[in-house]
Image (spheres, coloured by chain):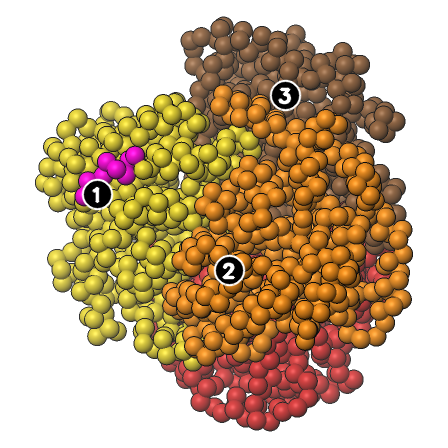
Chain colours: A orange, B red, C yellow, D brown
Amino acid sequence: MSDRFDAIAPELAKQAIELPSWAFGNSGTRFKVFGTPGTPRTVEEKIADAATVHRFTGLAPAVALHIPWDHVDDFAALRGYAAEHGVQLGTVNSNTFQDDIYKFGSLTHSDPSVRQKAIDHHFRCIDVMDATGSRDLKIWLADGTNYPGQGDIRSRQDWLHESLSTIYERLGDDQRMVLEYKFFEPAFYHTDVPDWGTSYAQVSALGDKAKVCLDTGHHAPGTNIEFIVAQLLRLGKLGSFDFNSRFYADDDLIVGAADPFQLFRILMEVVRGGGFNNPDVAFMLDQCHNVEDKIPGQIRSVLNVQEMTARALLLDRDALNAAQSEHDVLGANGIVMDAFYTDVRAPLADWRESRGLPADPMAAYAASGYQRSIENERVGGTQAGWGA
Amino acid sequence: MSDRFDAIAPELAKQAIELPSWAFGNSGTRFKVFGTPGTPRTVEEKIADAATVHRFTGLAPAVALHIPWDHVDDFAALRGYAAEHGVQLGTVNSNTFQDDIYKFGSLTHSDPSVRQKAIDHHFRCIDVMDATGSRDLKIWLADGTNYPGQGDIRSRQDWLHESLSTIYERLGDDQRMVLEYKFFEPAFYHTDVPDWGTSYAQVSALGDKAKVCLDTGHHAPGTNIEFIVAQLLRLGKLGSFDFNSRFYADDDLIVGAADPFQLFRILMEVVRGGGFNNPDVAFMLDQCHNVEDKIPGQIRSVLNVQEMTARALLLDRDALNAAQSEHDVLGANGIVMDAFYTDVRAPLADWRESRGLPADPMAAYAASGYQRSIENERVGGTQAGWGA
Amino acid sequence: MSDRFDAIAPELAKQAIELPSWAFGNSGTRFKVFGTPGTPRTVEEKIADAATVHRFTGLAPAVALHIPWDHVDDFAALRGYAAEHGVQLGTVNSNTFQDDIYKFGSLTHSDPSVRQKAIDHHFRCIDVMDATGSRDLKIWLADGTNYPGQGDIRSRQDWLHESLSTIYERLGDDQRMVLEYKFFEPAFYHTDVPDWGTSYAQVSALGDKAKVCLDTGHHAPGTNIEFIVAQLLRLGKLGSFDFNSRFYADDDLIVGAADPFQLFRILMEVVRGGGFNNPDVAFMLDQCHNVEDKIPGQIRSVLNVQEMTARALLLDRDALNAAQSEHDVLGANGIVMDAFYTDVRAPLADWRESRGLPADPMAAYAASGYQRSIENERVGGTQAGWGA
Amino acid sequence: MSDRFDAIAPELAKQAIELPSWAFGNSGTRFKVFGTPGTPRTVEEKIADAATVHRFTGLAPAVALHIPWDHVDDFAALRGYAAEHGVQLGTVNSNTFQDDIYKFGSLTHSDPSVRQKAIDHHFRCIDVMDATGSRDLKIWLADGTNYPGQGDIRSRQDWLHESLSTIYERLGDDQRMVLEYKFFEPAFYHTDVPDWGTSYAQVSALGDKAKVCLDTGHHAPGTNIEFIVAQLLRLGKLGSFDFNSRFYADDDLIVGAADPFQLFRILMEVVRGGGFNNPDVAFMLDQCHNVEDKIPGQIRSVLNVQEMTARALLLDRDALNAAQSEHDVLGANGIVMDAFYTDVRAPLADWRESRGLPADPMAAYAASGYQRSIENERVGGTQAGWGA
């Protein structure tokens, strides 16, 4: 194990996973959002928490922003604040689903003036990116309809193309657009970007700076997600991952919590397809810590990705190729399962220590007093959540 | 058609569908709740709206309450208010999912003091029932866990049994408990009453006054719901329906909107199993009108149930029995489809008029000015929603 | 109704639905294939049965072939035989899933010699098309794997592209390739063409003569199929439909039997997107009549498509557009439901008679004596099925 | 690890998993059954193969029979044959789905004479059990319908109850009936025992000798199977497991292959609920090795169950209880994941050797020459499959 682990360590050392600022705020379901002591009230406090995750893990050097949730007057100053805390500002997520005007759509709305308002919001997001140095504009649309006939599915695709084209034109040379797809919710009859095929068709019509964002929780039951990963890498269109996990719908649970073997298979195809430590493929989390603590929830998440990446890197690809070419079904599967069942936790702990990181980031965080400190300090104000 | 319709009209005349008070308030998803002009601010305004649905359709003589959303100091007075508006107060729905103490469960919580608090809430609901003359206490639990290991699935069943037993003992002679099951949400790993089997096992352990509530949106993908209807009727344990429809998860769309043929099949088994116009089987709606108008949404819903009931009653049961016993697959299916494809709307319109009701309740409501009137009158205050 | 119906009758008169030759043979599940009296023993008898469906309905002027199931030495003679019976030979379906050499794949097999064998089979299919005058080569692949690691998902896509390119080059100027996708079965871990996105990406890399075939039973649970229809029409890549219906997996039940409203919505988008009576979009059935009689099963199927097409054509598109642009959710949905609930059966019966067809093709077939005649005549020999 | 492993070794030593005789024969899908060299032609050869699995693993001391697939004239002699090979004859599986008379049902058929024929078949199975010393009669029904209206769902439940009662009465004092449920297939509209609730209701109406059989592949997408395990154990009605795994439908893949973490959670609830090494709860496999070798496929399967059982037994239950009672979500989940991620393979290999078994049964079998030997010997005859 030790030799095998040493061989993959240099790759692990490069791994970076972007954290979502909103994971540190409160979240919940339509039934209830529970508050928790210590929850940030400001974007600066979110960044401080994200930086804490990075300090304990060395895995999370960037924080994604959600606009307008994370709006500030001076994004250049915010960039400086983040840098002081040891992290960068990452992907900018546009939000066109909480203004009353978007009740019936945003970039796909039948009314050109509403579409323009949504386009303008994306222009502002690009302005933010200019100030923060962010590369990626991530677009997830809540657009869709609840009842057959409510909207014209076909025209909405055309309007979507127009809107995206206009936004795309505004991107700088080093900026990208990533278009996320989602099977359902909050729309219940149709969503305007429901599957990878739609996202792929739309971004292909734009140009090289437009890519697909794959959120692991946004598929129909039973979907083979690693196939989509392999396909998008092959087509040169996988721009980023939103990692999380799910048992049913878009549960936004901790990545690897619901089906660790699925996460392994996804990472196996990422490695196979050249998507690992590839700057074109961003790794991000998109999760909700509804009932568990948020900072350790994020620490657990990046560790899960790291541990599973180690297993995927340990896969004996030569042996696998040989078994595959001989159609040795059990042998090939056995090689895959061997990598999955390898317990990488002890060597990872040693390796973390060798790099000046805590061997057990979860325990180290718990012992650090940070949580108690923020619970004491963050009194008053309005806790951050999806609405603010 | 006319003769066939006349034969079923007496049964249709008895049909009653209970409306949920909360359908008249605002609802939405975790992403956004959109407000709408004219939304009630008080339970009295909800009742007035529900009574309006009844006035235009003759189908909705009762309004279900949700406690504490619909809490008032004087429920006897509320009962009188409802009576003045021509409706009764119906099922009382307990709510143990919005108090912070229930973050990790209510009737299934590992802490006996929390369970007692939840039990006490149900005692108060029974007090409300005593005052309102309601028969049914409906229990839907948000209880469950989000992560494997978070709770002890087995003990929680035992605690659930204890809690339900204590509540059951408090029921009056003419009161019942109906226990609703739900596949998932808001809990994402396990729910404590996920399926009809669990609800059936739990209520069977209590006694004859405990029944199962079947919400048509609370099943796994592909579930044959009409089979469950037939089975629960056979077992004497179908207490009530929560009607709505769904494409994906618990979408709470208008009943019959997503899969009208499924609604037909459900009603066909209701009729077959003796569940129609059977006082033991309550018909209720449980819906969310997130993007459509609420009062016409409820009118449309009760009409959908009525129209589909008419089709189910028109089924030529003798011919079907004959085809079934001859294993004439296409013939038997054809008889079912013939009933489904029969357009009952014109005879229903005539029949409504003959009973002093509008032929087209949707059009009559639109023309009535009620909507404009409440939009003008209901200014200020806080619009009702799930949180209030 | 009469005027509305007259307006759509000319469009209905042009409708053509291709029948699968294999629907007339025996089929079943892995558990059992039940035989039935009168089942064809030869391709000629299948064609005779298909011609019978056309004779009673006027809807089914072509029969699709499956090679090698329908192999004959002289396809030109078979074409003549069909013509004498009043039908054409239609789409040629390749079969690369029943030869032992294809156990681990055909066009995607890791061994180039197996891929070549599968390519050669498609060349033979094109030869058949030349002889029969068929336009479309339909490719459905059983290729896939059962266990993670069994095959290399990524390489198989590349091999698929190579194989398809080679076949594509062989197509004549007036011939097309349609590539079908399927979620799962017979492969259980991954299929090489699992979704419309994959089929679209593959055919787009070939050229204008390659299109997507959409089988209505080949999707993940909950998939919005009409969205895919609208999208593929928009992209100019919808080549053909395989109609059938399903409750769970690829059940291959009679089209419209499981979810008639879904069929309506699909046809609504077909009409909306210009796919109806468009020569680029072929309508075909792909069904298994495991327990019901086969010929009336096919008659019922084409009638279901016809009736639902009539409802889709009756949709008041202007009113719908107006309601959509006003965001009148209930109004727009009501217009859609009004078309769906319209009982078109009586006017269709009258119209059939006016065209010299039986008013009720199901009854006419039952009364015709054809079934008794084939049961008496087709004695001995081997009944056709999927293996022969 | 060593101490922890020693503590659970005595429990592991008692583990027994029954093998299905049919796993050694050929199987496939409706599209194709591939044959493989060395496949048994007789029940004796199946038993010899099963005994081989036991010889290499020490885990599989019994073989389940399927009647009439495994019919012999002298079952007492077969019992002796098995004993000579070191295994017992186990559960007897009835088969009422391959005779033409059962096309429309067996124990639920509307014709009493067909039901009686199916009952008689079960009587013969009980006779077999008397001769073989088997305890359990396992009933899986293919009964159901493909189209709404084809059969009367409600009456079929009543007929099922009558049929089961008659069979139940025939059971000896030490014999049991286990009733398996299945979501769908081969019936596509309704199955007569689709879910655990139905099986539970039916067996509860019979008596203590009737239990539920849980096949891990027979649930709707997303079903929380470990919940059902916990519930049935709590209700005292879990009679046996049919282990396998699935990605989509009833794929019958190797247990643990598709979702190893699900298998872990199931075994965790088995241990929690007292179902492990409990004679009332039989562990069986029910799998199809369509593309992989059959004997090593079975070896892999029992090893998967053993390895996962070891992980479940290693769970620190006291620590988990403590974390649960403190609502430490991440802590409790971490304890569960720690057990799951523990690599038990090395200590299991050592322990096997200490018991005179091969450290690596897969490698030992491959090196044994058994496979080559049967491939050479088993020439001619008809390979066993589902039809013989």
Q: Chain of mark 2?
A: A
Pointers 3 and 2 in contact (C-beta within 8 Å):
no
Q: CA distance from mark 3 to mark 2?
A: 57 Å
Where, by quadrant of the figure, is residue B217 drawn? bottom right
Task: Work out which quarter of the rendered image holds the N terminus of chain A and state it.
Answer: top right
Q: Amino acid at mark 2?
A: Asp
* Residue that mark 3 sits on: D299
**Which is in the foreground here, disc 2 or disc 1?**
2
Q: Chain of mark 3?
A: D
Q: Chain of mark 1?
A: C
Q: Is residue C169 magenta?
A: yes
Q: Amino acid at mark 3?
A: Ile
Q: Are marks 2 and 1 on the same chain?
A: no
Q: Is residue D49 above or below residue B74?
A: above
* Residue that mark 2 sits on: A173
- Nearer to us in this view, D181 or D365: D365
Q: Label 3: state its secondary structure.
A: helix
Q: CA distance from mark 1 to mark 3?
A: 50 Å
* Residue that mark 1 sits on: C175
Q: Is residue B376 above or below residue A189?
A: below
Q: Is residue C263 visible?
A: no
The residue segment tinted magenta is: C166-173
- Nearer to us in this view, B142 or B29: B29
Task: Work out which quarter of the rendered image holds the C terminus of chain A and state it.
Answer: bottom right
